[in-house]
């Protein structure tokens, strides 16, 4: 229920679960001292309230236990509550690094001119430099602030930087990006995405899959559009997350800026959607979930909606956009009619089976364990203590082995 943010947004907007859980906590108070009584249900409610409201990874929040401690002196050291905001003790402190001329070798690389290098050579060097820095100096690459970068962001850099599609085991979990996180995000990352995209646009035959459509719409028109309840609530959660990480200012305009960006993305993508009669309700409207990808880019661009839109608009022409930006291909004209009308996203129809094939070939015992348990790898939570920098060599080895297989399937998404 709470491992997928879109699932939680749906439940909250439909059934007001936060209000229900808070009311239940409030009604479970001790008549003598007024404190919330500790029992199995109150522990679980407290955990769900924190887990769904304080989003992020293990270095960004402190989740309360779901059971009592064996310490008889303090069987439950967590503060319970029956109203928002969530107590501060559940938020971890996020510190900015001291400013400097450059943050790391990777930051220096991004500032250097690419004179004398072809676009392909620069992209390869960018990938190598990033991966080396991630292994050897992760503290340097995190730059502006220490927080949890989505795993698929770091891994999918291979897709963005050299079309190096590899075993991106978290690609299909995009709605979980705030929970399934690895240890680094940096102020360099936004600059890297922009520069990589600009270089890729110099070689459109290799990277651009979709035509780049213009988007002509005024702010007045966008202000007249309405976002769904899920989009609105997701926007509030994303802005609160960005402020906690000190990547967004405390200015009250941040919510409005993100909402305007989401409306523009929705308007732009809607112009590329098919219209047809279907018994599947999700095909008759805009993408039902929150646009977490656009929200992530907004946070990476420090709340600059023009900069975020420029990236998203240009990124929409790349093959990678069809897989990383979930609303991008919702009932899209770029998909075969049969696939568009099915409401099955290409991530699931062209990528996920490769994940299980690679798992079976590389880790047969683990694959067998999944089969025996009755669960698929896609039903697992994030791995505690996982740091992508510690597994780069393994992942690049998988890239060498399986890139052509996975890339071939990904490139067929717009072919009938």
Image: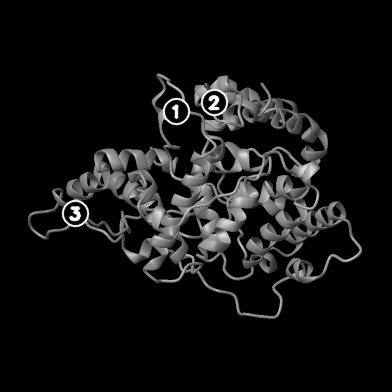
Please give the name of the residue rendered at 22% of the width and 50% of the height, measured from the top-left corner: 22
Quadrant of the rendered image containing residue 159: top right
In the picture of the structure, the residue carrying the numbered disc 2 is 340
Image quadrant containing the N terminus: top left
Q: How is the image coloured?
A: one colour
Of residue 57 and residue 304, the one placed in the foreground of this image is 304
In the picture of the structure, the residue carrying the numbered disc 1 is 283
Of residue 326 and residue 329, the one placed in the foreground of this image is 329
Q: Is residue 268 left or right of residue 159?
A: left
Checking the image for residue 36, the label placed there is 3
Q: CA distance from mark 2 to mark 3?
A: 50 Å
Image quadrant containing the C terminus: top right
What is the x, y in percent for residue 111? Answer: 76, 71
Q: Tag 2's secondary structure?
A: helix
Q: Are marks 1 and 2 in contact (CB under 8 Å)?
A: yes
| Front disc: 2 or 3 | 2
Q: Is residue 247 above or below residue 363?
A: below
Q: Is residue 59 left or right of residue 399?
A: left
Q: CA distance from mark 3 to mark 1?
A: 45 Å
What is the x, y in percent for residue 61? Answer: 44, 58
Mark found first going from the N terminus, 2 or 3:
3
Q: Residues within 10 Å of mark 2 (few under 14, many from 20)?
A: many
Mark found first going from the N terminus, 1 or 2:
1
Please give the name of the residue rendered at 71% of the width and 52% of the height, measured from the top-left corner: 390
Q: Tag 3's secondary structure?
A: loop
Quadrant of the rendered image containing residue 73: bottom left
Q: Tag 1's secondary structure?
A: helix
What is the x, y in percent for residue 275? Answer: 47, 28
């Amino acid at each position: 229920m709470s491992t997928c943010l879109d699932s939680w947004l749906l439940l909250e907007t439909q059934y007001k679960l936060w209000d229900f859980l808070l009311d239940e906590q409030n009604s479970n108070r001790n008549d003598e001292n007024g404190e919330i009584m500790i029992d199995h249900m109150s522990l679980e409610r407290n955990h769900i309230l924190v887990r769904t409201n304080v989003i992020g990874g293990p270095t960004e929040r402190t989740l309360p236990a779901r059971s009592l401690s064996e310490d008889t002196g303090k069987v439950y050291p967590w503060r319970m509550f029956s109203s928002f905001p969530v107590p501060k003790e559940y938020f971890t402190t996020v510190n900015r690094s001291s400013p400097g001329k450059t943050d790391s070798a990777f930051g220096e690389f991004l500032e250097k001119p690419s004179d004398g290098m072809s676009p392909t050579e620069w992209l390869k060097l960018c990938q190598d430099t990033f991966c080396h820095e991630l292994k050897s100096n992760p503290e340097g690459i995190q730059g502006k602030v220490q927080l949890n970068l989505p795993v698929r962001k770091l891994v999918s850099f291979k897709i963005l930087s050299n079309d190096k599609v590899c075993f991106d085991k978290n690609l299909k979990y995009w709605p979980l990006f705030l929970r399934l996180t690895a240890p680094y995000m940096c102020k360099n990352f936004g600059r890297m995405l922009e520069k990589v995209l600009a270089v890729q646009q110099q070689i459109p035959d290799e990277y651009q899959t979709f035509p780049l459509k213009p988007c002509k719409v005024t702010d007045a028109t966008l202000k007249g559009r309405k976002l769904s309840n899920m989009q609105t609530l997701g926007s509030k959660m994303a802005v609160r997350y960005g402020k906690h990480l000190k990547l967004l200012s405390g200015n009250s305009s941040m919510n409005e800026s993100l909402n305007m960006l989401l409306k523009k993305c929705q308007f732009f993508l809607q112009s590329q959607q098919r219209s047809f009669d279907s018994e599947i309700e999700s095909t008759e409207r805009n993408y039902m979930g929150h646009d977490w990808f656009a929200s992530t880019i907004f946070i990476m661009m420090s709340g600059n909606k023009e900069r975020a839109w420029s990236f998203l608009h240009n990124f929409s022409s790349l093959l990678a956009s069809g897989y990383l930006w979930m609303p991008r291909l919702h009932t899209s004209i770029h998909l075969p009619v049969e696939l568009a009308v099915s409401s099955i996203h290409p991530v699931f129809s062209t990528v996920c089976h490769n994940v299980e094939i690679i798992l079976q070939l590389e880790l047969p015992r683990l694959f067998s364990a999944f089969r025996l348990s009755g669960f698929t790898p896609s039903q697992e939570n994030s791995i505690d203590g996982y740091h992508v920098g510690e597994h780069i060599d393994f992942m690049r080895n998988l890239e060498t082995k399986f890139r052509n297989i996975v890339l071939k399937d990904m490139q067929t998404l717009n072919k009938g």
